[in-house]
Amino acid sequence: MSVSSGTPTSSLSPTDSPSVDTAALPDQPKSIVRQRQRSGSLLYALHSTRATPEARAADAWGVESDEPSDPALVPLTVPLPESPTDTAPNNTSNATDVVLDIALQADAAFFALLTDTITEIAQLQKRVSDEFMTEVQGLARTVSDAARPTSERGKSDLYAWREIFSLWVETQVFESNNERTRGERPLAEAEDRLGKFAREVTKRGLGDGRTLKRADSRAAVEKFLQLNLDVLNLKKFERLNADAARKILKKHAKRTALPTPALVPGGDATAMVLVLPKSDPASSLAHTLLLALTETLLPVLPSVEDYTCLICTSIAFKPIRLDCSHLFCVRCLVKMQRAGKECCPLCRSPTVLRANKVNLDAALLNFMNDWFPKEVREKSRSNEQEIAIEEIEQKGYTDKGSPCTVQ
């Protein structure tokens, strides 16, 4: 590294900064711990979870601060002292510049210490991710066993868990799917929404014996909330680490004043710019854990949206699978055949009029009876009423005529 003879060097040594304790993970907030000790339940402890004014201020600062044009870079500009060659007389402009090569031992030690610390944090990230995945997989097995159909086991919490997952998706605790606010939520808002989710679960009776019939289901709700709280704490942990890294490097830059070329296009050549990666939601640990929670746990329970008739948009009762492999409920197929429609509404293949009882998907029918018993019963009653109305209309009785009177 080439520096001018007047540039000071850092006096930082490896012993000045303690190494990161890879066993140290973000703890739960003290308020939640106290509430949990009093109530004995994380669900009720989360009722009082709300973002602190400091957290809201930190989020506001992060939004309002000026960012560079490249979102992957965060420049920290520190003015440098003028180099001795900048004030040299004009008559010495043709003289050979004298450059001294000085080995900066303190700087080498600083960056070695920083590299070791980052390596330890990466190892911590890998271990936390593996442990989280193990817990999510264990919770998925518990929920799958507790929500089995009643045909396989007497007690089932199928609809309770389906409502819990639906409420969690609607609350959008950590990420927003709305067009205006799409993306990762600020920490303060995520903390508020987690408390709102816990309060709504209690309000609907989804966290106790009012709705959950099995003891392992009630324990699984606590575990599910704990995993959400872990994700929230890790987001806080990442923010603290990012802020600490920026402050450390900024302090080091001020003490050393090493001349570094400007990395911002059009910037001042006498300024030093430290480039640090911003926390990218697509690659952060918290986002990775959230994806694991969504992709591993939620698909445990089949969704009714995956088994709906595309014509009536309700469950495909007595599902008929056409030769083109598309699925419709029996009532919609009968209506199409009566209307003389030959082509499939989706692919336009001439398969509608050829369909008969052979096209009934018996395996899917049994699956729907097991996993969607309420929806099947409601569709069955709706079909019976519709058939009865059609039979009355065929006999000439309609509600347009005079009302029937009994004499």
Image (cartoon, rainbow, N blue to C red):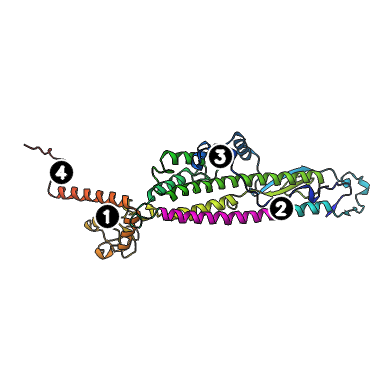
The amino acid beneath tag 1 is Cys
From mark 3 to mark 4, how far is it between C-alphas? 63 Å
Return the residue at label 1.
Answer: 332
Q: Residue 215: image x %, image y %?
A: 43, 49
Image-based side of 169 in relation to 15, left or right: left
Q: Decide: few, some or many residues near mark 2? Use Cα within 10 Å; few <14, some 14-19, many ≥20.
A: some
Q: Secondary structure at mark 4?
A: loop
* Residue extent of the magenta highlight: 117-146
From mark 3 to mark 1, how far is it between C-alphas? 53 Å
Residue 194 against residue 302 in the figure, above or below:
above
Return the residue at label 3.
Answer: 32
Residue at 79%, 49% in the rendered image: 15
Q: Nearer the viewer, mark 3 or mark 4?
A: 3
Q: Secondary structure at mark 3?
A: helix
Return the residue at label 2.
Answer: 117
* Between discs 3 and 1, the one toward the N terminus: 3
Q: Secondary structure at mark 1?
A: helix
